[in-house]
Image: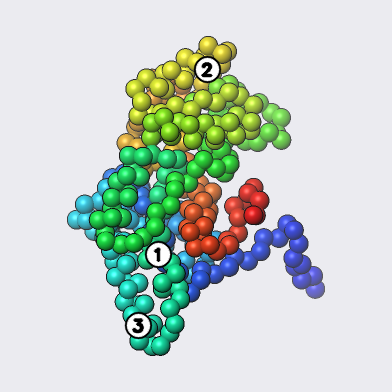
């Protein structure tokens, strides 16, 4: 007979369920809504739900006009969530329940699908929250975070631009010896991406410079600086999830810098876990910490 599985430090604990009455997690998705964007958002929330069973997770599109079926605007999703919560709170009071979860938490928690701070996009998301008439709470962007450096490493290795991990000693013929970490959001976003860049540089043992796609000439400047320091085979790593930039923008920047580009982060598993971590932080609940991140 097989032995029963014993818990141990290498066995992942079962995730806790979402608290009763917890507000919905609303993922604020930038960019023009389309099938690819919807699939990315749905996969991200699927990862979050797998980490916290019972999680009520919804998608709100920042740039939706509310006319396309299946692509609800962020404003309409928040207005509906607030109306639902008010109705349920009223029902609970009529049933004689004491004030509890319905009053201690906001009607919704909005998590931007952004790898780093982009003030222009965050301002539009904040405006949608205000226009909805909801008292929903908006979290910060997902990064900078060590797991984003891991995701960048994976995307570079998938493109043949970096070793899959440092434990493997074989070399990749096309491996880059200098990385341009592309972001959007101006100087603040570049500074935030620089933190992930330092972590990525430590993983790959090559120089990494952050640059903004929305600052004219910034990508070319970073490329010139890397080449001046001795790098010859450059690669562009989009420090972006994907929907926040126009299609083809990263490839155009790579062409400008005369280098190859890796794919955006997309629905990398860590993205879903970071989305959930932002939500749980507002609620003050504990969830399984993302791998590689020590529990507090």
Residue 100 visible in the displayed image: yes
Which residue is the site of mark 1?
A: 106
Which residue is the site of mark 3?
A: 91
Q: Is residue 96 left or right of residue 9?
A: left
Q: Is residue 173 left or right of residue 167?
A: left
Which residue is rendered at x = 62% and y = 35% of the image? 164
Residue 58 visible in the displayed image: no
The answer to whether the residue labelled 3 contacts the one labelled 2, judged by CB atoms less than 8 Å apart, is no
Q: Secondary structure at mark 3?
A: helix
- CA separation, marks 3 and 2? 62 Å
Q: Secondary structure at mark 1?
A: loop
Disc sitting over residue 236 in the figure = none
Earlier in the chain: of badge 1 and badge 3, it is: 3
Q: Name the residue furthest left.
A: 67
Which residue is the site of mark 2?
A: 226
Which residue is rendered at x = 63% and y = 66% of the image? 14
The answer to whether the residue labelled 2 contacts the one labelled 1, judged by CB atoms less than 8 Å apart, is no
The answer to whether the residue labelled 1 contacts the one labelled 3, judged by CB atoms less than 8 Å apart, is no
Asked which quadrant contains residue 190, the reply is: top left
Number of residue marks? 3
Where's the N terminus, which quadrant? bottom right
Earlier in the chain: of badge 2 and badge 1, it is: 1
Earlier in the chain: of badge 3 and badge 2, it is: 3
Q: Is residue 242 above or below residue 89?
A: above
Asked which quadrant contains residue 288, the reply is: bottom right
């Amino acid at each position: 007979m097989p032995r029963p599985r014993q818990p141990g430090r290498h066995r992942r604990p079962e995730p806790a369920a979402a608290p009763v009455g917890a507000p919905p997690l609303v993922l604020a998705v930038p960019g023009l809504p389309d099938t690819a964007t919807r699939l990315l958002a749905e996969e991200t929330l699927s990862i979050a739900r797998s980490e916290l069973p019972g999680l009520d997770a919804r998608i709100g599109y920042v740039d939706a006009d509310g006319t396309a079926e299946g692509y609800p605007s962020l404003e309409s999703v928040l207005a509906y969530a607030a109306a639902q919560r008010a109705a349920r709170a009223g029902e609970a009071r009529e049933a004689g329940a004491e004030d509890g979860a319905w009053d201690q938490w906001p009607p919704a928690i909005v998590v931007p699908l952004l790898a780093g701070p982009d003030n222009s996009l965050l301002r539009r998301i904040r405006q949608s929250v205000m226009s909805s008439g909801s008292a929903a709470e908006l979290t910060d962007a997902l990064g900078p975070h060590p797991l984003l450096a891991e995701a960048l490493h994976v995307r570079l290795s998938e493109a043949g631009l970096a070793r899959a991990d440092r434990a493997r000693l074989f070399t990749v013929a096309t491996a880059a010896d200098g990385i341009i970490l592309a972001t959007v959001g101006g100087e603040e976003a570049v500074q935030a991406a620089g933190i992930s860049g330092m972590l990525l540089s430590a993983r790959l043992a090559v120089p990494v410079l952050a640059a903004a796609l929305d600052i004219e000439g910034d990508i070319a400047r970073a490329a010139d600086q890397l080449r001046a320091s001795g790098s010859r085979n450059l690669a562009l790593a989009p420090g972006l999830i994907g929907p926040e930039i126009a299609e083809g923008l990263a490839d155009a920047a790579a062409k400008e810098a005369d280098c190859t580009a890796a794919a955006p982060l997309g629905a990398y598993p860590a993205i879903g876990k970071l989305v959930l971590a932002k939500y749980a932080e507002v609620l003050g609940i504990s969830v399984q910490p993302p791998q590689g991140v020590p529990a507090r």
